[in-house]
Image (cartoon, rainbow, N blue to C red):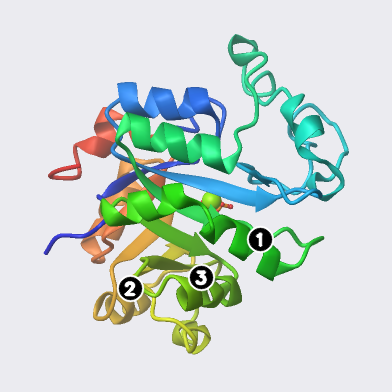
Amino acid sequence: MSYLMPGLIGHRGVASEAPENTAIGLKRCKSLGIKWVELDVTQAGDGSLVMMHDETLERFGGRPERISNMDREALMKVDAGTWFSPVFAGEPLLFLEEALDLVKTLGLGLNLEIKVNPDLPVAPLVDAVVANRGLDALHNGERLVISSFDHTALARVAQQKPNWALGALYEGVTEQWAESLTDFTPYSIHTDFESLTAKLAAEIRAQYPLYCYTVNDPITFQRLLDMGVTGVFSDRAHAPDMRALVKAG
Ligand code: G3P
Ligand code: MG
């Protein structure tokens, strides 16, 4: 059985080696042999789509600004590298169209996670993401999975792009996991590994590919593979001890 995504996916790029969701991180993925990456995209106050996990800049040096109060010009001035290491000082935030260009140039596969900004409505975010032609190109090359914890967002993607592969994300997966899947059919299920039981893994795997986040050690990775998990998101997707556990990719 072949799957769109491999057994190891770079989480936020290669988050143990380079600042997350950045261009330098994507280039590092390529040089380290990572084939697929997971990146977060969210919306700023002016509608800009920025590659960003958080709702504020606090982690980037204690700055309190909320992304929903910022525009593209302000975001372009953010140093997204120094917080990780002075080596990456001045690394800018990426915008979605830049990230898609780079993913394409580097020949990577992309799991784009739509992070709904709690300060802003869902529909304009989803519509702005879906409108990017670069995503159609990745989809046509079988190099795209769109995921979100917000399943209404995924349903809205499905309305516009019925053939795109959708990953339904869960934080604390439960026996009721299928109840939110009424308005779209997922390609895959993505969940934290801590809440995944063997029983749930078997039930999900009977219907869908199953991916877990964020798995950074080979003992946990092997345990999940033994439960039938298809693959994992890892900050260490380049590491030999992780790669030794997957046959290919
Ligand atoms: O998409 C998998 C994983 O990235 C979800 O959690 O918080 O790291 O975006 P988070
Ligand atoms: Mg993510």
Instruction: Determine which residue is flagged by label 1.
Output: 125
How would you rate the neighbour count of disc 3 (Cα within 10 Å): few for under 14, some for 14-19, many for 20 or more? many
Q: In this view, does 40 lie above or below 80?
A: below
The residue wearing badge 2 is 201
The percent coordinates of residue 126 (x first, y second) are: 60, 64
Q: What residue type is labelled 2?
A: Ala
Q: What element carries label 3?
A: helix
Residue 64 rendering spot, x and y as whole percentages: 88, 38
Q: Where is residue 88 in the image (x, y as percent from the top left)?
A: 60, 15
Query: Which tag, 3 or 1, sits closer to the chain's start?
Result: 1
Q: Is mark 2 on a helix, strand or loop?
A: helix
Q: Which of marks 1 and 2 is nearer the N terminus?
A: 1
- The answer to which of marks 3 and 2 sits earlier in the sequence is 3
Q: Which residue is more in the foreground, 200 or 167?
A: 167
Mark 2 Cβ and ligand 1 under 8 Å apart: no
- Direction from residue 230 to residue 78 in the image, left or right: right
Q: Mark 3 highlights which residue?
A: 157
* 239 lies left or right of 173: left
Amino acid at pointer 3: Val
Give the quarter of the image for residue 152: bottom right
Disc 1, SS: helix
Q: Can residue 192 be seen in this view?
A: no
Q: Dot 2 surroundings within 10 Å: few (below 14), some, or many (20 or more)?
A: many
Please give the name of the residue rendered at 43% of the width and 47% of the height, measured from the top-left corner.
Answer: 134
- Give me the disc on residue 248: none
Q: Are marks 1 and 2 in contact (CB under 8 Å)?
A: no
In this rendering, which labeled residue sits more in front, label 1 or label 2? 1
Q: What's the amino acid at mark 1?
A: Leu
Q: Distance between the residues labelled 1 and 2?
A: 31 Å
Q: Is residue 124 above or below residue 113?
A: below
